[in-house]
Amino acid sequence: MHSSVYIIWLIIILTTVILIILLISQVYKVKGLKGELEKTKKSIDEMDEQAKLILRTDLELNKTHEELDRKMTSINALQNISRAISTTLEETQIFKSIREYHIKDMGFEKALVFLWDQEEKKFSLNLSLGYPQEKIDPIINFVNANKDYYLLLIKREMPITLYSKNEDRTVKDKIMKALDVGNFIISPILPKEGSKGLMFVGTGRLDTAKEEGDDESIAILANQLGQSLENARLFEKTWAAQQELEKRVEERTRELSRVLEEVNTISKRKTDFVSSVSHELRTPLTSIKGYASLLLSGKFGALPEDVKLRLAKLNNHTDELVQFINDLLDISRIESGKVAMQQGRCDIKKMVDEVSDLLSILLKEKRIEFSYSIAEDAKYVLADAAQIKRVFINIINNALKFTTEQGKITLKSCSTPEGIQIDIADNGCGMPEEAQNKIFEEFYRVDNLINQQLRGTGLGLTLVKNIIEAHKGRIWVKSYPGQGSTFSFLLPPAA
Ligand code: ADP
C-alpha cells in the first residue's frame, strides 16, 4: 500500500511537472505570437504611412504637372507675343500685335501699357486689354494723378507685384481698386531710345495662387516690348533720315540741273556773243591789214622808213589780232559742236614730222633738241589730222616758249587700255601745282618771268583741250617748277 501511494504521488508529481512544462512552453508561445503581432502591426502602420506618402506625392505631382502646363502655356504665349512684336517696325503696330488671348494664356485677364510723354508731361495709354470702354478714362486719370509715383517705378527699373514687400499696402489697395484687379504686376518698359513706360497686368479675382515666375514672365515681356520699341524708333529715325537725305538729294539734283541749264544758256550766249563779235571784228581787221599791206607795197608811192616800220608793226599786230580772233572763234565753234571732227586714220609719225618741220626754225634758233619715239602698237589714231596737228603745234610751241636755250623736247606715243597716249615733255620752267588745272581755262596764264616778257593770249591750251575732248579724249599735265612739264593726252586708236 505504501508503495502504491508512493507511485501515485510520483505520478501526480510527474504529471504536475509535465503540466508546468507545458504551461511554460505555452506562455513562451503566446509571448512569441505577441511579438509577431506587434511586428505585423508595425509593418501595417508603415505601409499605411507609405500609402499616405504615395498619395501626397501623387497629389503634389499632379499639382506640379498642372503648374508646368500653366507655365508652358505662359511661355508659349510669351514666345508668340515676342515673335509678333519683334517682327514689327512700327510703334503703333507693336501694341496692336499684343492680343487679349496672349495675356490670358499668360494667366492674366487685364493688361495696360502706358508711355510717358515728355512733351505733354503725362502718361498716354497705348494698349488696353480686358477693360470696357467706360473704365479707360478713369484709369488714365488715376495713373496721371499719381504720375510721380509711376515715374519713380520707371526710375527704379524693377517690377512690383501685390506681394512686393517694400510696397505700402494702401498703395497696392488703391491700384487694385483703380485697375479693378485682384492681383497685379507692374513692370517698367525701358527702351534706350525715346519715352519709357509701364506695363500693368492683373487678374480679376484675388488670386494668391500666382507664382513667383509670373512677375519674371511679365518682366521679360516688358523687356521685349522695350526692345521692340527701341528697334522701331531706331528704324523710324533711320528711315526719316534716309527720306530727308533723299529729299535733299532730289532738291540738290533739281537745283543742279537748273544751274546746269543756266550755265548752258549762259555758255551758249557767250559762244554766240564771241562768234558774232569775232566776225564783226574780222571784217574791219582784214581791210586794215589789206590797206597796211597795200601801203607797204609802195603802190601809193614810196614811204619814209619810219612810216614803213610803223606800218609793218601795224601789219604784225593785225596778224596777231586775226590769229586771236580765229582762236576765239574756233574755241566757241568746237564748244558748241559746230565744228565736226573729220575723223580718219592718222599716222602720228607723219603729223609729228610735219609739225617739227614747221617749227624747225624756232627749234634751231633756240638750239632745242626735239626727239620722238612711237611704239609699234601706237602708230595710228582715229582723228581729224588738221586739228591734231594744231594740238601738236600748240603744245610744242609752248614747250619751246617755256624752255630755255639748249633744252630738250621729247614726244612719246604708246598704247594704253584707254587709247593711244601721247606725252610731250620738256625740261623748261614748269609750273606750280595749283596752276596745272587752270591752264586749260580760257585766258589763264601763269604769272612768271617768261609770260611777263612774251605776249600770249591764254587761249592755246583751251583750244587744245576742246579739240581733244571733241575726239572723246582727255588731256592733263604733270609739271614740276624748275624741272619741266609733260603734257599727256589720249586719242582713240585706229586699226
Ligand atoms: P599762252 O601760251 O598764250 O599763254 P596757253 O593756253 O597756250 O596760252 O598756255 C597757258 C599757260 O600755260 C601759259 O601762259 C603758261 O603759263 C602755261 N604753260 C603752257 N605750256 C607750258 C609749258 N610747256 N611749260 C610751262 N608752262 C606752260
Image (cartoon, rainbow, N blue to C red):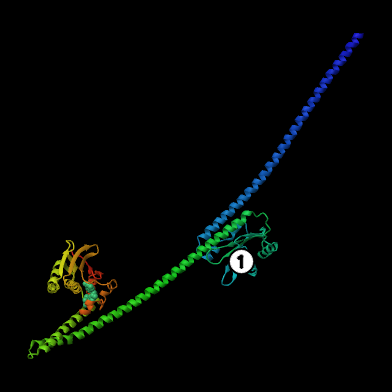
In this rendering, the answer to whether 6 lies above or below 130 is above
Residue 355's spot in the image, x, y percent?
14, 71
Residue in view at x 72 percent, y 38 percent: 48
Residue in view at x 37 percent, y 73 percent: 253
Residue in view at x 23 percent, y 62 percent: 416
Residue 433's spot in the image, x, y percent?
28, 71
Which quarter of the rendering shows the C terminus?
bottom left
Is the CB–ligand 1 distance for label 1 below 8 Å?
Answer: no
In this rendering, the answer to whether 132 lies above or below 310 is above
Name, please, the residue furthest toward the bottom: 301
Amino acid residing under circle 1: Leu
Q: Circle 1 sits on which residue? A: 151
| Left or right of 199, for residue 39 | right
Residue 72's spot in the image, x, y percent?
58, 52
Asked where in the image residue 340 lies, by quadrant, the reply is bottom left
Asked where in the image residue 463 lies, by quadrant, the reply is bottom left
